[in-house]
Image (tube, helix red, strand yellow):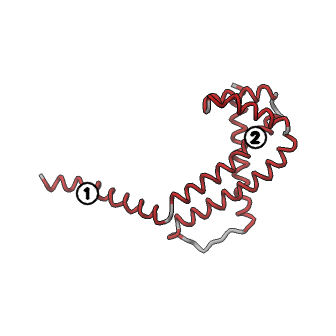
């Protein structure tokens, strides 16, 4: 009977060893630093993306309806600050002409940084699988912009569908 118990514990021992190896490699490769850098730069890309999406939506929707939708969604996320943020969004939309061009430049800058950090983090994570295949510079430069464009179009689509419902 003791032999059966040992056989049953073999997968748990293997899982434990694997988990310890993963955590050790994560710490050795400074995984917390990498994940923090990726999250920080992603946040810096998402904020201008949402700002530009609001400006874009303001061309297709009435400003009051847009602010009402923003306030409704903010009530779910940060109920105590929804009014304050809605007032700031309203002031933001009043200056949409200037904000649009500045927002595009900020979005391009921060999304490039975010994808550079992400690409560097992936190269650290998968350093044992390094292939000597380099993409052309223009392809690497266009990937972040295509991703941001797809995310923006997806958010616009979801907004239009939820508005229609």
Disc 1 element? helix
140 shown above or below 103: below
Please tell me how crowded label 2 is: few (under 14), some (14-19), or many (20+) other residues with Cα within 10 Å: some
The answer to which of 138 and 62 lies nearer the viewer is: 62
Give the percent coordinates (x, y) of residue 89. 76, 35
- Give the residue pinned by disc 2: 53
Point 66% across, 71% down: residue: 134
Question: In the image shown, does 35 or 15 lie closer to the viewer?
Answer: 35
Q: Which circle marks residue 129 in the picture?
A: none
| Number of other residues with Cα within 10 Å of mark 1, as a class: few under 14, some 14 to 19, many 20 or more | few
Which residue sits at x=57%, y=66%? 123
Above-or-below relation of 51 to 34:
above
Give me the residue at 50% from left, 70% from top: 128
Label 2 – label 1 distance at C-alpha: 53 Å
| Corner quadrant of residue 85 | top right
Residue at x 66%, y 58% (from the top left corner)? 115
Tell which tag, 2 or 1, sits nearer the viewer.
2
Which residue has dot 1 on it? Answer: 10
């Amino acid at each position: 009977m003791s032999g059966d118990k040992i056989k049953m514990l073999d997968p748990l021992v293997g899982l434990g060893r694997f988990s310890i190896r993963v955590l050790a490699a994560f710490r050795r490769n400074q995984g917390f630093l990498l994940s923090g850098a990726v999250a920080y730069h992603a946040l810096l890309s998402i904020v201008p993306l949402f700002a530009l999406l609001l400006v874009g939506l303001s061309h297709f929707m009435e400003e009051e309806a847009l602010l009402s939708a923003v306030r409704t969604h903010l009530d779910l996320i940060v109920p105590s600050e929804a009014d304050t943020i809605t007032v700031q969004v309203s002031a933001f939309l009043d200056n949409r002409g200037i904000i649009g061009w500045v927002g595009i430049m900020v979005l391009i800058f921060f999304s490039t940084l975010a994808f550079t950090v992400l690409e560097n983090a992936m190269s650290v994570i998968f350093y044992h699988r390094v292939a000597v295949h380099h993409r052309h510079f223009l392809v690497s430069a266009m990937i972040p912009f295509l991703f941001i464009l797809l995310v923006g179009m997806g958010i616009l689509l979801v907004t239009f569908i939820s508005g229609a419902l």
